[in-house]
Amino acid sequence: MSRAARTPLPSQPERAPVRQTGIEVALSPVGITRWIWRLFTSMRFGLALLLALAVLALIGTLLAQAPAAVRSDSQAYAAWLDSIHSKYGGWTGIFDRLGLFAIFSSLWFRALVVLLAVSILACSVRWAPRLWRKAVHPRTIMPDQFFDGAPLGVRMASKDDPDDVLAALLPTFRSRGFHAIVDRDGETVHVCADRFRWGPFGRVVAHLSFVIILVGALIGATWGFRDEEFAVAVGSKVPVGYGTGMSIEARSFSDSYYADGAPRDYSSTLVLYKDGVPVRSQVVRVNHPLRYGGVSFYQSFFGPAAVMRVTDRDGTALFDRGVPLLWGSDDGAHRIGRFTIPERDLTVFVVGAASGEVDPSIAAGQMQLEVYKGGEENPVAVEVVDQGKPVQIAGIDFTFSRERQFTGLIVSRDPGVLVVWIGGALLVLGTCVVFFFRHRRVRAMIRPTGAGSELRVAATWRRDAGFQPLFERLVEDIAVAFEREHPPQLRR
Amino acid sequence: MLTVSEYCVLASIVAVILALLCYVLVFASVRVARGRTALAGGRSGGGGATVTIVRDDEGSAGLGAFADLTAWLALAFLTVALITRTIATGHGPFANMYEFLIAFGWGTLAVYLYFQHRYRLRALAVIVLPIALALLAYATTIPDTAAPLVPALQNNLLLTVHVAVAIIAYGAFAVAFAAAFLFMIQPRGGSSRLPAPELLDEISYRSVLIGFPFLTLTIVLGALWAEVAWGKYWSWDPKETASLVTWLICGAYLHARVVRGWRGDRAAWLLVAVFVATLFTFFGNYFFGGLHSYS
């Protein structure tokens, strides 16, 4: 009964060959549809997409990428291109035309991401039902040839009849974590035992989670908003906008440093108003954002602000707030802020000397005001004003009361972020399940013989060297459960 | 405490050098055992995967065991170095390049020793230990001052977990690279000096099985942290993007393994690319700016 003359075993059972794509295309709607289906469900295509995305992302780390704020302003973008011209020379124009300076919003990148998502969905549609069938309704009755040819296999004999053998076998499978399905083919009992039979679904989960993350990113980009330059001068209250009905008042800001000059802490005390009512007061610092009603406020930057008071002839205040000097001048010598007086159709630029810079025309305690009317090119007036001294421009009084700090916040609402977190969690979960809970299937067949019954246990495996030790431990357990006088003949 | 940590790093470097010398000697003496071990290392359908070539050679077995011991010692020293540094600084030892290098070296040694423990495959050491040695030696050349944390890093939990998980992934990719490298330099038909190609392929794959989930977790935790600290879960920051490149190539490798025509050498090349991308991610801030500038 033992196989005296061993036939050479297949050393590595090969996976069913992956179907070649796009060799013959029948030029009919059905033919083309089939070709597209084959393309998107082909592993080779997925592999090519992954590598192409990797190449584009690599380019994105190697080439300078234009910030989003620069890209949205054609003048700023032209200046930005000029600034990198020294680095890339004649290539600058070519790279720009290929979209390589904004690669992650380029057509190439987006097209590849969409293709990958479609490919993942197609593969999931193709494979998930098969995995389901394989896990829930496996083929239970296997022919003798399977047991003859399986790379892992063992035979044992027992004096008991098949049902007693089965009764001894099932607890052994269970104790090793196998879920067993029993079927009968006449007198013969067949067992299909699976360990981690849901493991392969981790692959589907991991793949689909990629699509979920993309959906989350899309939701955020479509219905969210993001303001990276939301600056509030200490003592002022600024509306958030974007239809939120929220305003932020900065009560204080502080920046502290270690002895070596490295930053230690940036913190702002903020009060959040919703429809004019204060709803939240919190100290916001890096790593501790303020969150309310789906909107988050993050500490991001800070700088000087000029508190400006603008009054009418009859003393009515037209503007009374700190103006954050948000921008630096090109030469770095000045800080520039801007505010508007809609009632008079005026735009006012406030220019101060940058810290550490000495400018004889704008001394400490002074600000230069440039006042523009409507869309006119030339200013109505350019005046340097002293702190606390009102100046009359365009028939109204401008007073620079004092210098304060402003706190710069990122304000964002991202309704997709939860979806992204779910996708991220599923991605981690899916990969861990695939890699740490491998599905293993062992089959057994119990057949009555004249003297009792014969038990055969066998398994195949694909590139899974960890299976053999497990199989051997299982077989040892089974052997222990049987009479000792029939030692198993283990075959490799 | 910091001084203790620095001495431990030096001790670890000495131990790694010693271990490497022993491993090289073992590796060089394998030839002697060729005739005897041809059968043991022969075809076993993947089943005899745990059989190593040096096992039968008594002379080098003693030396090999000594090399293993020294490598474990190096890991122990590095562990002490990292722990003492954590105690001294009050945060996970992952806040500047010096600390990252020590941790990377630790991860490389740890993953190597795990595989050495499981598969008794000393040939890997000839590639892995020089990598660990280079990381540690480089660490001694850069400032090791324990600077306090800048505001963005003041998140002890995420700092520790995000980087610790990354270090394991990086270590796994270093081992995967070593196995792929040995796989590729093998002449057709195999070499008696080197482990069987199937075994090397298996080791590469196993390393990636560890590395890939850990890298995924690193990126997801990084996104989580970025949302809290930078206000955006993904900003295409260069280091972020470089880690994505590593992840994509690694994903490509996992698919390549089951695509006809990509198994073997091409898959091994992808692992080389994964490791190069890992190094690029790790040292990236030397080439590009970005939000990760402190690392």
Image (spheres, coloured by chain):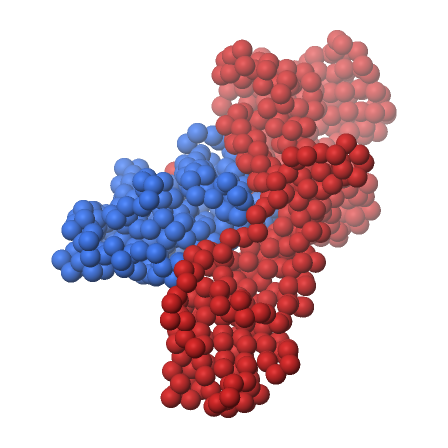
Choose between A395 and A418: the one closer to the eye.
Answer: A418
Looking at the image, residue A244 sits to the left or right of residue B243; the answer is right
Residue in the foreground of this view, choosing between A462 and A142: A142
Question: In the figure, is residue A100 to the left or right of B272?
Answer: right
Q: Is residue A16 or residue B285 the one in the foreground?
A: A16
Above or below — where is A397 with respect to B274? above
Q: Which tint was used for chain A?
A: red
- In the image, residue A146 lies at what x, y percent? 53, 66
Residue for point 58% across, 76% down: A191
**The N terminus of chain B appears in which quarter of the rendering?**
bottom left
Left or right of B103, for residue A386:
right
Image height of A393 relative to A285, above or below = above
**Which of the 4 image quarters holds residue B233?**
top right
Is residue A135 shown above or below A378? below
- Regarding residue A239, the answer to whether it shows in the image is no
Residue positioned most to the top? A378
Q: Percent from the top left, x then y, of residue B174?
A: 38, 46
The answer to whether one can see residue B23 in this image is yes
- Nearer to the camera, A336 or B265: B265
**Where does the image place residue B25, in percent across and percent down from the top left?**
17, 48
- Quadrant holding the C terminus of chain B: top left
Q: Looking at the picture, how far across and down is residue B159, in whole percent?
A: 48, 51
Residue shown at the point (53%, 75%) measured from the top left: A444
The colour assigned to chain B within the rendered structure? blue
Q: Residue at x 51, y 88 (%)?
A: A450
Q: Please give left or right for residue A413 compared with residue B121 in the image.
A: right
Q: Residue at x 68, y 34 (%)?
A: A24
